[in-house]
Amino acid sequence: MIWRYIHDDHVDAAFGLAADEYMASAVGRGISEPVLRLYTYADYAALVGRFQDVENEIQLAACRENGVRVNRRPTGGGAIFMGHGQLGVALCVPGRQEDTYGRARELMARFSEGIIRGLNRLGVQARFRRKNDIEVEGRKIAGLGIYRDNSGGLLFHSSILLDMDIPMMLRVLQTPFEKLSDKAIHTVDQRITTIRRETGRESDMEQVRQAICAGYREVFKSGLEESDFTHAEREAIAQLKKEKYESESWIFQKPAVKDAVGAARIKTPAGLLEARVTLAGTQIKALYILGDFFVSEKALADVEGHFRWHGSAPEQIDATLHLLYEKHGGALASLPADALRRAIRTALDRARIISKKAADEPYGCFVTPGGNVHV
Amino acid sequence: MAQKAFEFPEELYYDKNHHMWVRKDNSATIVVGIDAIGLDNLGDLAYITLRPEGTVVKKGETVGTLEAAKMTGDVFAPVSGRIIAVNNACVENPGLVNSDAYGKGWLLTMEAVNWEEESSQLVHGDDLEPWIAAEIQRLENQGFDA
């Protein structure tokens, strides 16, 4: 089978997202061949996940000051920062006959394999991390998400880091750091990595695109034919952009379950330990571990990665910590497991109090049920 | 690899395209939720929205949206009908769907308008065991820890 390969650069946030959603729908309805789109956003865009609250995730004043466009993806997960150094991947494939929810794990692993093989070709030892990241030795290099359009089309989204302006990212996204400092920049720098850092070369975006194309050709045994949006597609994308991705009701919608953030600081013999958790309902969406103790940053990044999308019940936390301390052994030696357990549990208790308060004082509006706009 | 066990209550009907379950008693009202394999694949749910009571849908149309660890997407009507009630407890705490899929994790009740015809497309009775076995075999081949 021949897929369409579309590449474009410096796209506006609303256009970028509208094009991805429309093409997933077109592929699902059988009016387009599958599409692999590799593109970059105009500097810069801050994109929240499908059900996130913009005000919780984005520093809107900083976005206004720096001309950063804010929008909402159809795919889930956390807020991302996109610009000329990050490659957006949108893979649109048909899913109408697929038992999609029975195959979500398989789909995520398979779709990400094209990216992993592409990164391997560049000399980056990337691998799939359980749930929805691609990592290099514990450091995140790409995020992943899947959206199923109600026509049955599947949209696989990824953002691959060729490079990253961490100070700008920290200005724009809400983070656990109280202020932009060298320490905050260093901490983030240890949790993520980029193609340029891993290869030690000044690779350009075109080389990355070619490698990702080769990776997908290999995995899906598909040919890729250079393509562009047709006139009719551009018109339909423009309509979706206007009706949905430029609409405040889409971008600034409030979820029924508001994320709650809780933090706890604990003194340990090795130094101060701070745990910050983001809780959505009963799920831990993110854990950040900060402090002035000395442990392997890779091990710490792995601990944080394991707690992404993790249950919040005490026995679930204990079981995962037990596995992680067995796995990393000495690398976490100066961070006592009991202290970390206590810090996470206390942070969760505080997040639950905030969550309950938010439930008692609900937003004035909820996400529009079935709120996808289709053209 | 040890075979993973999934709970599939025998009295229910299952939509094999979307892994939804349906409970039908003697009245025209049905109860709808997501089945164990669907949930195992989606991972933990963090958000769910459901269309309001009174909404009329055809089989396969969307009755809501969800975000799980693995994907975002729609919740699909297993049969045609009118939504009678939505389970707001699940909207406020989507973890209920994962922890008690066939009990407190029900999503909505519907008045089924074409049950006789559409229920024949759902998996039930003698067809249930071979379907579950085939699904588990498929998942074993996929690998659970992907």
Image (spheres, helix red, strand yellow):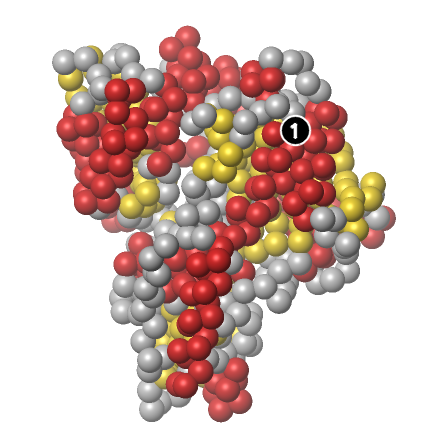
The residue identified by callout 1 is: A121
| Foreground of the two, A265 or A294 | A294
Image quadrant where residue A183 sits: top left
Q: Quadrant of the C terminus of chain A?
A: bottom right
Residue beneath the point at 29% across and 16% down: A295
Residue A41, can we see it?
no
Above or below A23: residue A164: above
Q: Residues within 10 Å of mark 1 (few under 14, many from 20)?
A: some
**Left or right of residue B91, residue A92 in this image:** right
Above or below A63: residue A254: below
Residue A208, can we see it?
yes
Q: Quadrant of the N terminus of chain A?
A: bottom right
Residue beneath the point at 49% across and 27% down: A136
The picture places residue B78, in percent across and down from the top left corner, at 48, 75
Above or below B6: residue A364: above
| Foreground of the two, A108 or A273 | A108
Residue beneath the point at 36% across and 19% down: A297
The picture places residue A103, in percent across and down from the top left corner, at 51, 58
**Left or right of residue A22, residue B68 in this image:** left
| Foreground of the two, A79 or A223 | A223
Which residue appears farthest toward the right when viewing the image? A231
The picture places residue A268, in percent across and down from the top left corner, at 15, 17
